[in-house]
Amino acid sequence: MATSKDREEPTGGEQSSAEASGPAVEEQRAAGGEAPESGEVEQTAETPEGGTRLSPTRERSGMFGVRGSGDTSGFGGLKLPGYAPAPAERPYGGWFDELADELAESLDRRGVARSAVRQITIDRGEITFYVERERIAEVCRALRDEPELRFELLSGVSGVDYTAPDGAAVHQPLHVVYHLLSMTWRRRIRLEVALDPADPHLPSVVSIYPTADWHERETWDMFGVIFDGHPALTRILMPDDWAGHPQRKDYPLGGIPVEYKGAEIPPPDERRAYS
Amino acid sequence: MSTTDPYSAEPRETTEGTVYTVTGGDWDSLMDSVSTDEHDDRIVINMGPQHPSTHGVLRLVLELEGETVTQARSVIGYLHTGIEKNCEYRNWTQGVTFVTRMDYLAPLFNEAAYCLGVEKLLGIEVPRRAQLMRVMLMEINRIGSHLVCLATGGMELGALTGMTAGFREREEVLHLLEYLTGLRMNHAFIRPGGLAQDLPEDWAAKVTEFVTLMRSRLPDYDKLLTGQPIWKQRLEGVGYLPVDGCLALGATGPILRSAGLAWDQRKVEPYSCYEEFDFDVPTATEGDCYARYRLRVAEMHESLKIIEQAVDKIEPGPVMVADRKVAWPAQLSIGSDGMGNSLEHVRKIMGQSMESLIHHFKLVTEGFHVPPGQVYSAVESPRGELGYHLVSDGGTRPVRVHVRDPSFVNLQCMPAMSEGGMVADVIAAVASIDPVMGGVDR
């Protein structure tokens, strides 16, 4: 599979050095500046952006940090942490500033710590809020009910598995993504929650957005994410007795046996590829 | 049940109780065989997944008190093909071939929404001619999709002439699309960066001819169905879902507009030059099956208006971006063995330019790199908001392609529309949702 995640690194410095500077710190302040929860300390001490999809805890190997092979020639290249979205920097532009302020204020009014939003990223004209998993339902309720926010419609819930194809360690690779639409303000936002595959639990939002029912069942079915509080979290697309969660990157793919001379078409991830 | 019928299925005992198989016309004999002293009127009925009135491989589980539905649930997944997963093992251009097969009644909408997402990731603007042609193709496709909705919905409610008429007109749509794109369905014609190729030379005449034909045929539906007493009695006040129910359940498209909210992606978040077109968004306030039927008919007339304007607007120009790093390198032409790479192009890359050959090989086998990030792109498909969530890690293949298919979401409204009503009204409600199982199950 693709090795495109691996990139040349100009120096041996921390991948997040650029991101850990001004904007990230400022964002942390904007998001409340509260002390991170105990479980997050190790990570957030290094990266204030916290909920990024790939943290510097991903191991680097090769070149200067050679391990195992003893090859110091450099031909082995340097494997780097993959893409991590950078926190947005104030001013965000457009309606993004207003929205972020409104959300922060409404969280205050509702007694939800501002640190519920771990990071805000703006990319290609779309805003993404990385939300702490314990707070996702409260954040959704604020987004739905506050008149200044008024996200009436949950477009969808789905998962993304950011596990690196080369097997490199990725911190919290399992993401749950919510797309919200405000018809009143004609705005779309994205909420993202990062999870550990060993503990794939997060609160269900079905009581806030009933439409999430099937979406969450699909995300459970495909990614094995457990939505606590869902009325009936059962499989929806796969048969009830199916084992495994097919959209996980580590889900084994099947080959196709062909009859002639016992050949077999290999699974897609083992086929000859040019990329 | 007659024992001489070789196809009759005998009652069998299960842990839930006796299970009977009803095949039609045998209700009375079934009721006779069930002793009434040990059973009440409560019956759990399983409809589908192979059933002529469930709009595809949809399975409905209905709990009945007499003929009143007390609980309704839909069971899906019978057409799950893993298209989203498959996309992760192909390059971005190949993805079009997969997504076009999801909602198979609206293939061009799938292609357009997917390509708009890829183009947003790439940060490229498609040539104007391609954008307008996409609009025209999508609106032709919308007419075809709505016609199938009327046709199958009519069939499920017993209006068989509605079915034959609907499929007759839909055939015109498919003929036209075949002429324009080369394929009746699953076109894979809209590609990241534009279109696969330009339309045939006399496309404008063909499209105008089609518009004229549909203008003469569409009023037939008013004569056949709109004012027809049986049709109205089956649909009016049936499958009611108010606007707050629509929003809570995520319903979009004709269901939401039938409840009074004029929400149409083409108007509120215009894409692909829709802001230049003059058309109305039909709405109703009844929120019932009949309103949804009337909206679909009205939308077909609006689509004809858009198609006509598109024919006038389309000017000569390229249909693919100029960026050679994205544009598919093929230069198609008609040869002695049909459509294929033009001989001049093959001669050039094979004989004259090693760089062109390498470029062709790299782009076709590996594909183009898409900068890392994620986007959500939504279009107004015939059934509502069709959204694509695309994630790239910077490689030539998607990390994730998630489709927010409107059929999937809208089908959740079925219990809200049907519970408390009659069994026959469940069929009307499902028909008015117009789920396409290829899109629901993906």
Image (tube, coloured by chain):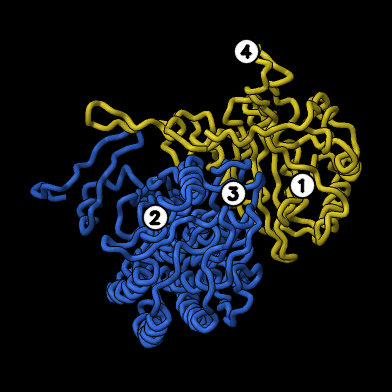
Tell me, yes or no, whether the two marked residues, 2 and 1, touch with CB atoms within 8 Å: no
Quarter-of-image position of residue A22: top right
Identify residue type, mark 1: Thr
Q: Which residue is mark 2?
A: B346
Kindly identify which chain the residue marked by label 3 belongs to: B
Residue at 83% x, 37% y: name it.
A18
Q: Residue at (40%, 44%) from the top-left corner? A: B81
> Are both tags, 1 and 3, on one chain?
no
| Front-most of residues A224 and A138 | A224
Q: Colour of chain B?
A: blue
Mark linked to residue B390: 3
Q: Position of residue B339 (x, y in %)?
A: 33, 62
For mark 2, name the chain.
Answer: B
Q: Tell me the kind of residue under disc 2.
A: Val
Relative to A92, residue A270 above or below: above
* Distance of label 2 from label 4 (alpha carbons): 45 Å
Residue bearing mark 1 = A121
- Chain hosting mark 4: A
- Of all chains in the rendering, the one displayed in yellow is A
